[in-house]
Amino acid sequence: MSFAPGILAGKAAIVTGGATGIGSYIVRKLGSLGARVAIVSRKEANLKSAVAAFKANDGIDVLWRVGDVRVPDLMQEVIEELANEMGGLDILVCNAAGNFICPTEDLSPNGWRTVIDIDLNGTFNCCQAALPYLKEASAGGRIISISATAANYGWPGAAHAGAAKSGIQNLMKSLAVEWGVYGIRANWISPGPIAGTEGVDRLIIAQGRAQEALDSIPLGTFGEGDDIANAVVYLASALGKYVSGTELTVDGGSQWQRR
Ligand code: HXC
């Protein structure tokens, strides 16, 4: 089951962290529905192998640039180049994230700073760099940030990521108001645990918490990458044109589970 073929034809999208995990599902879905897609992340090897796989498995040509979302000048340069190469920019997916489990009492200032810098500052850097192009998007620019349901609660063991992802949510609300006048919609998706991603493997399964996590999901399974990708398509397409400044939670109902 899918959206109408070509629903994103003529659109140009940048997905940060698009070479791996949830980002790669988003890229595949946007590309297969007609969008021109570019990915940005830190590791050239990941970018190259992802681009080859998108081509071989899905027949999608994906542009790529090495870039660290923490570096504002670099992101200005990279987003400018990609937008020019694609003939504009309609959709920015702020997906790049870093995370690790560490009790807050043991977390070094640099550990805290690193995750805030990648997740929250990185999202700000990309949004600001993309603004001139999103302003020109013919059907209204779309910013879709990937947050996490855990950010709506305390996130014991990942206070840095919880604070950063909460900050992203508030940033999206502010941009929805400030940049709504430019026709830009700014929203965030809060995924629950998504199977086969580094986040779930490292933060849940490797911590011996797989069963506990499954027990907290009313629908009884982890999500799939495409569950998040489909939510992105909805927000990025004409179907989501009146949605701005809000959360789309994709978590199998877990947020309402009594803890
Ligand atoms: C304690 C740690 C640590 C750990 C790093 N640090 N890993 N502290 N426990 N496990 C500390 C380091 O000691 C250092 O502080 C500081 O953090 C920076 O570490 P670097 O390795 O120098 O940083 P960098 O190379 O920039 O790497 C960033 C990273 C990295 C976040 C640390 O692990 C990363 O990028 N991971 C891959 C991305 C990722 O995790 N993606 C999945 C996100 S999933 P000191 O003081 O020593 O200098 C997600 C949602 C999951 O966000 C939802 C699940 C339900």
Image (cartoon, rainbow, N blue to C red):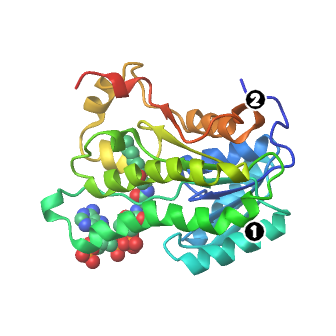
**Res. 227 in view:** yes
Q: Does 2 sit above or below residue 167?
A: above
Residue 224 position, x and y percent, is 53, 34
Name the residue carrying label 2.
3
Q: Amino acid at mark 2?
A: Phe
Query: Is disc 1 placed on a helix, strand or loop?
Result: helix
**Res. 198 in view:** no
Residue 58 position, x and y percent, is 76, 46
Residue 115 position, x and y percent, is 36, 64
Pick whichever of labels 1 and 2 is earlier in the sequence.
Answer: 2
In the visual, does 172 lie left or right of 99?
Answer: right
- Residue drawn at the location 68% of the way across and 63% of the way down: 131
Q: Does 132 sit above or below residue 71?
A: above
Residue 17 position, x and y percent, is 56, 59
Q: Does 153 sit above or below residue 199?
A: above
Q: Amino acid at mark 1?
A: Leu
- Distance CA(mark 1)–CA(mark 2): 26 Å
User: Which quadrant of the picture is home to ligand 1?
Assistant: bottom left
Residue 112 tag number: none
Neighbor class of circle 2 (other Cα within 10 Å; few <14, some 14-19, many 20+) is few
Quarter of the figure with residue 255: top left
- Residue drawn at the location 50% of the way across and 65% of the way down: 122
- Residue drawn at the location 53% of the way across and 72% of the way down: 68
Name the residue carrying label 1.
82
